[in-house]
Image (cartoon, rainbow, N blue to C red):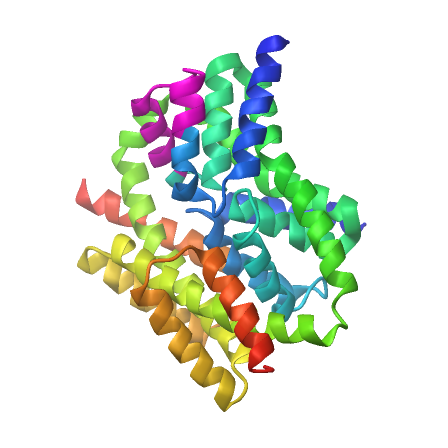
Amino acid sequence: MIYGLLFWEFFKIGLFAIGGGMVTIPFLFDLTKKYNWFSAEDLTNMIAVSQSTPGPVGVNMATYAGFQTAGVWGGIVATFGVVLPSVIIVIGVSKLLGRYKDSPWVIEIMAAIRPAVVALILLAGVELLKLSVTDRISALFGGAFFLMVYFFKKSPIFYIVLSAVLGVVLKL
Amino acid sequence: MAQLGKIFVSFFKIGLFTFGGGYAMMPLFRQELIEKRKYITEDELIDYYSIGQCTPGVIAVNVATFTGYKIQKVLGAAVATLAIILPSLLIIMVLAGILNTLADNQIVAHAFAGIRVGVIALILKEVIVLFKKAVATKFQLALFVCVLFLLFCIHFSAITVVLLAAFAGFVKRLKDR
């Protein structure tokens, strides 16, 4: 039953992807290896679309991934799956807001999770890079583009549209 | 009921008009929830964000759940959460459907080949930004290096890595006490 499995996998992502939208990338990357739901290439497209459409990136990614896997119901099931753990936890935490936030246990555990999550995203980024940068032109384009993204603060949408135009012009 | 309707409209609007998620959504949260509706205070919004960062899931959704819960308990939380994700559901599925039918188009293929390279640049920049925020102590640097090493040599899943890091933080707290 694809919907049950889809729900379970996205529930797990909702439970373990701590720190926001980009953090879901390594988890979705794991799914490309585990199932034939969508490819790593699809994942890069999903990231681009999720960044340049309205709504929280993490939710957009779940909807897109679910839709690619099992159509409209897949999109709905994956989105509810990714959201449910945090809804349950937030309602639970709401009552003891201050105590949770200032608990030294929470602070130290989160301080340990954050660097690990950065490493996860870095690795997923490198894996995706190997797929996207395949020849000299795309390597040159990627390098130049990174410097631009790093030094000029423009919105992600600007860069995504620009990279699409350059992709067409350079016939990548 | 009227109250729930208002909650729904507020969060649907936020979901519809913000791009990027996380902190990018904060100005609209502030305008809609604090200034216009007076559902929450500035301090509460900052609290929700800081807790949203140490609870699992999408931060903007966490803020919606918190606010909805504050106004009208579980029902309010459910309505606010549903409202903020609904625009994503509709827009993404329509767009994904259109893009799938265009997949064979040569120009679209080139555009996406370009986008795929551009997105990697955005991810790597995000990694640098996150690294500066997440790695402040020697312990955190050691953890970062360990995780990277483990990931490159043994292919741990993302979930295993998060659990291991949480455990490391737990043990460190035990020792520090």
Q: Main secondary structure of the magenta part?
A: helix
Q: Closer to the camera, B102 or A124?
A: B102
Residue A128, percent from left and from top: 52, 72
Q: Closer to the camera, B130 or B1?
A: B1
Please indicate, yes or no, whether residue B16 appears anywhere in the rendered image.
yes
Classify residue A79 as left or right of residue B61.
right
Q: Which residues are magenta?
A: B30-52
Residue A2, percent from left and from top: 78, 51
Residue B72, percent from left and from top: 53, 13
Please indicate, yes or no, whether residue B54 appears anywhere in the rendered image.
no
Could you tell me which residue is drawn at 60 percent across and 23 percent down? Answer: B79
Up the image or down, A102 lies above or below B53; here it is above
Q: Closer to the camera, A85 or B16?
A: B16
Up the image or down, A9 lies above or below B113; here it is above
Q: Quadrant of residue A104?
A: top left
Could you tell me which residue is drawn at 68 percent across and 74 percent down? Answer: B107
Q: Decide whether residue B45 is among the magenta residues.
A: yes
Q: Decide whether residue B56 is among the magenta residues.
A: no
Outermost residue toward the right in this view: A1
Mark count: 0
- The quarter of the picture where the C terminus of chain A appears is bottom right
